Image (cartoon, rainbow, N blue to C red):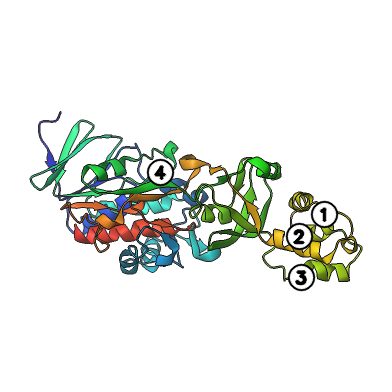
Amino acid sequence: MPDRSETYDAIVLGGGAAGLFCAAIAGQRGRRVLVVEHADTPGKKILISGGGRCNFTNRNTAPDRYISTNRHFAKSALARYTAADFIALVDSYGIAWHEKTLGQLFCDGPSRQILDMLLAECAKGDVEISLGQPIEAVDHADGQYSVRFGDRSASAPSLVIATGGPSIPKMGATAFAYDLARQFGLKVVEPRPALVPLTLGGDDVLFRELSGVSADVVARCGKTEFREAALFTHRGLSGPAILQISSYWRNGDEVGIDFLPDAPRGWLAEAKRATPNMTIQRQVAAQLPERLSEALIGRLALDGPLNAITDRKLEEAERRLADWRFTPNGSEGFAKAEVTIGGIATAGLSSQTMAGNTVPGLYAIGEAVDVTGWLGGYNFQWAWASAHAAAQAL
C-alpha cells in the first residue's frame, strides 16, 4: 500500500462521457481534479456510439424523453445545460456534424473527435487522468474520500460517481456504481437492460425466419408508442422502434406493432371494390416487404382474391395488421443493451447539484443515476447536463 496519499479537490470515478466532462468543467473552474478510469483507454462507449459517428446529442431534448422513478428529476440539469450549449462547444472545435432523423446529431467524421474534444477540455483544466488502474477501495472519514487504485492512493473532499451502468460489459461496464452508492447509504432502483433487442419464443418463433427484414412501423407498449423502423432478427425483434419500446417493456408485457401506420381505416374493403381480383397477399405486399407480408397473411390464414373474402374478415385482418401482438420472452440483456434503466435512486440526490442529500461531498452523474433517455442522443445529453450540474457545485 502506498505510504502517502495525493490530495485533490475532487476525484471523479469513471472516464466516460459524464466523468470527463464533469472533470473538465471543474478543472477549468480552478479545481484540482483526478479522474480514475479502470480501462486502459477513456471513453470507450463514446468511440462505438452512433455506429462510430457518435450521436452526441438531440435537438429535441426535453424532460419527457427520459424515464426515471422521479420524472421531474432531470428538469433542472437539462434546463441549465442544453443541447444548444453542447453544440456550441462542438462547433468551437470545428467538428463537422449532421442531423439525421428526429433531431439526432452525429459527427460527420469518427466518434474519436468528441473524445479528443473532451480530453482537450480536461487538459485546459489541468485534469489528471489515471488509466488502467482498477479501484481497490473507497473510504470516507474526517470529511475526506480516499481512493486506492493500483499502487496509488488519493484523497479529496468531493467524490463523483461516473462509472455508468452494467450495459455492454465487453466494454468493461460493471455495477460498481451501485455497490459504491449502497456503501454510502444511497438506494438503488433495480437496474435492467434498456434500448435492447427483444427475443421471441413460442408461437412467435416463426417470425425469426424473417431475419434481416425491416419495416417502418408503430411499436406500442401500454400507452407508449414510437414510429420508427423495426427489424426482425434471428432471435426476435430489433431496430429503433423496438429499442425504444424496450425501455418501457417488462417481462410478460405484450408489444403491439402497427405494420401499416399510414393505411386509412377500411383500406382493404376499398381495395376489394377497386381491384376485386387482386389477392390479399399482393395487396399487402404492395406496402410491406414481400417476406413479411407472406408471413403475416399466412398467420391470418387468408388466401385468394379480395372478392372471395368477406368484409368482416377483411376488417379483422386490418385490425390485426394495425395492432399485431407479440409477447417477447425476454431481451438480449445487458450484453446488447445500449443503456441501463434504474440505478442510483434520485430520491437520495439533489436535482440541482447531483449531490447526495445525506452524504456530504458525494455526487452521482450520467448513466449511474436512475435517469434513462430515449434512443438518439438523449443519454449523451443527460451525461453532459448532469456532469455540468455537479461540476458547478464542486
Pointer 3 residue: 266
* Badge 2: residue crowd in 10 Å (few <14, some 14–19, many ≥20): many
* Discs 1, 2 touching: Cβ within 8 Å: yes
Q: Position of residue 84 (x, y in %)?
A: 39, 68
- Local SS, label 2: helix
- Local SS, label 4: helix
Q: Which mark is residue 44?
A: 4
Which image quarter: residue 117?
bottom left
Pointer 2 residue: 317
Gap between marks 4 and 1 measured at Cα? 50 Å
Residue at point 80% right, 66% down?
Answer: 268
Q: Residue furthest right?
A: 277
Q: Which residue is nearer to you in this view: 195 or 250? A: 250
* For marks 1 and 2 on the same chain, the one whose residue lies earlier in the sequence: 1
* For marks 4 and 3 on the same chain, the one whose residue lies earlier in the sequence: 4
Residue type, label 4: Lys
Q: Where the N terminus falls, by quadrant?
A: top left
Q: Where the C terminus falls, by quadrant?
A: bottom left
Residue at point 34% right, 65% down?
Answer: 72
Residue type, label 2: Ala
* Badge 4: residue crowd in 10 Å (few <14, some 14–19, many ≥20): some
Q: Looking at the image, is 132 positioned above or below residue 326? A: above
361 to the left or right of 276: left
Gap between marks 1 and 2 measured at Cα? 9 Å
Residue type, label 3: Gly
Q: Nearer the viewer, mark 4 or mark 1?
A: 1
48 to the left or right of 178: right
Q: Position of residue 356 (x, y in %)?
A: 22, 54
* For marks 4 and 1 on the same chain, the one whose residue lies earlier in the sequence: 4
Q: Position of residue 377 (x, y in %)?
A: 45, 58
